[in-house]
Image (tube, rainbow, N blue to C red):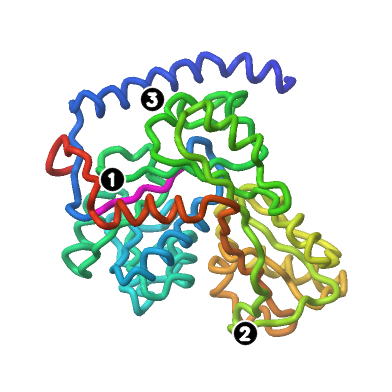
Amino acid sequence: MTAKATRRWLKPAAFLFRSIVRARNLAFDRKWLTIGRPGVPVISVGNIAVGGAGKTPLVTFLADMISGWDKKVAVVSRGYARKSRGTVIVSDGNTIMVPVEVSGDEPAMLARKLRHVVIVVDERRYRGCRVAIERFGAEVIILDDAFQHRACARDFDIVAVEAGMDIREEALLPVGRLREPVANLARADAVVLTKCPPSQGCEDEASKIFHACRKPVFPASFEPVAMVDWFEKKEVRIPGFVYVVSGVAHPDHFLATLGNLGIQVVGSSTFRDHHWFSDDDVAEILRQAGKTGAGAIITTEKDAVRLERFSQSFARIPLYVVVMEMRLLRDQQAFHGMIAHVVAGRRVNEPSGQKE
C-alpha cells in the first residue's frame, strides 16, 4: 500500500483523534475537569508534535537559568518509557537515587546534567509537584512534556517546535505528527523554535509561526560544547574514526552535528527512540565497531544513560558522548524577562480546582 493510500485510510482515525482532543480541551476550558494548582510558579515545556522537538535541552536551559537566580528548582516529568509507576524521586538535588530503568532516560539525563535540581517522575504531574514542594522545598516547578497535560496548572506554557517541520502543513495523528491542531498553539505563552542553524536564525519560520499563533517566537540552536568519555567522566579530543550509536527520534540531526565537527563516521547502529539496549545489542555494536577499526563509539547523552550498565563492555573501545547545549539566537533579554516575571510570582492563573 502506498503512503498516500495509507494516509487516506487513516483519515477517519485522525478525525476521531481531533474530536477527542477538542472535547478534552473543552472540558478543561469549561472547568468540567479538575486542575490542581501546586502553589508555586510552574513553567510547562511541551510540544505540539511527536518526536524530537528538543524539549530536554530546553528544560536544562530553563533550570540552569532559574537556579542561577538562587531559586530551588524541581523538574517534574512523567518519565516516558520507564519501568516503574507512581512517584519516583530521581534526584534529590545532590544524589541520583534510582537507575535509568526506573526513572526513564530523559529524567536520568536531566539528573546528570542538573546536579542541584530536584528531579521527580510521576504520571500524575500535580502529585509529583506536591512531593517536590513538600519534601524538597521546591520554589519553582518545570513541567517536562506537559503542554497536553492540563490536569496540572501552570503559570507559563512554552512549546518547542522543531525547525524544518512546517506545522501548518502537518496532519494530526495518526496521519501526521501533530498531537493537536496548530490553532491550539494560541494556548501557549511562547514558542521556542529549536534546532535552528546558528548562521541562519530561522527568521522566516519564526515569522510564520508567529502569524499562526500571535505569541512570541524565540529561535534557538543546539550546539556541541564538549566531547567526553562517558565512563571516565573527562573531556577528550575528537577521535579520527568513530562508530555511531543512536536511539533518538531523529538520528540524522545527530549525524549532521558530527559531520559539522569534522568527525569521520565509519559505521553506525540505529535504534528506535528510547530503545532499551540488551546484552546482544551491545555485543553487536562492539563487533561492528571493531570491524571498522573505529577508535571510539560516539552516542548522544540520552543514549549514554541507557548504556551505563554496560561500562565493562566498553573497556576496549571507549564510549564518547557529544554534550549539547541550547542557545537562544535572539531576544535573550526578552525571554529572560518573561521567565523572571513568572518566577517572581507576578503572574498567577486562576485555578479551576484543588487536586488532580
Q: Nearer the viewer, residue 178 or 61?
A: 61
**In which image quadrant can residue 246 be found?**
bottom right
The mark closer to the camera, 1 or 3, is: 1
The amino acid on which the numbered mark 1 sits, given as a three-letter code, is Asp
Q: Which residue is mark 2?
A: 234
User: Which residue is label 3 attached to?
Assistant: 21
Describe the element under mark 1 as helix, strand or loop: loop
Q: Position of residue 164 (x, y in %)?
A: 67, 38
Q: Which residues are magenta?
A: 41-46
Query: Badge 2: few (under 14), some or many (20 or more) residues near its Cα, within 10 Å?
Result: few
Whether residue 24 is situated above or below residue 79 in the rendered picture: above
- Residue 45 in the magenta stretch? The answer is yes
Mark 2 lies on a secondary structure that is strand
For the point 40% across and 36% down, the residue is: 188
Are the residues at dot 1 and dot 3 in contact (C-beta closer than 8 Å)? no
Nearest the camera: 282 or 342?
Answer: 342
Q: Is residue 349 magenta?
A: no
State the image coordinates of residue 120 (x, y, percent, origin top left). 32, 62
Q: Which image quarter holds the C terminus?
A: top left
Does residue 65 appear in this view?
A: yes
> Which image quarter: residue 258?
bottom right
Label 3 sits on what residue type? Answer: Val
Predominant secondary structure, magenta span: strand
Q: Amino acid at mark 2?
A: Lys
Choose the circle earlier in sequence order: 1 or 3. Answer: 3
Disc 1 packing (10 Å; few <14; some 14–19; many ≥20): many
Identify the mark nearer the N-term, 1 or 2: 1
Is 346 displayed left or right of 118 in the figure? left
Where residue 139 sits: x, y (%)?
24, 63
* Residue 155 image label: 1
Q: Quadrant of the N terminus?
A: top right
Say whether residue 41 is left or right of residue 257: left
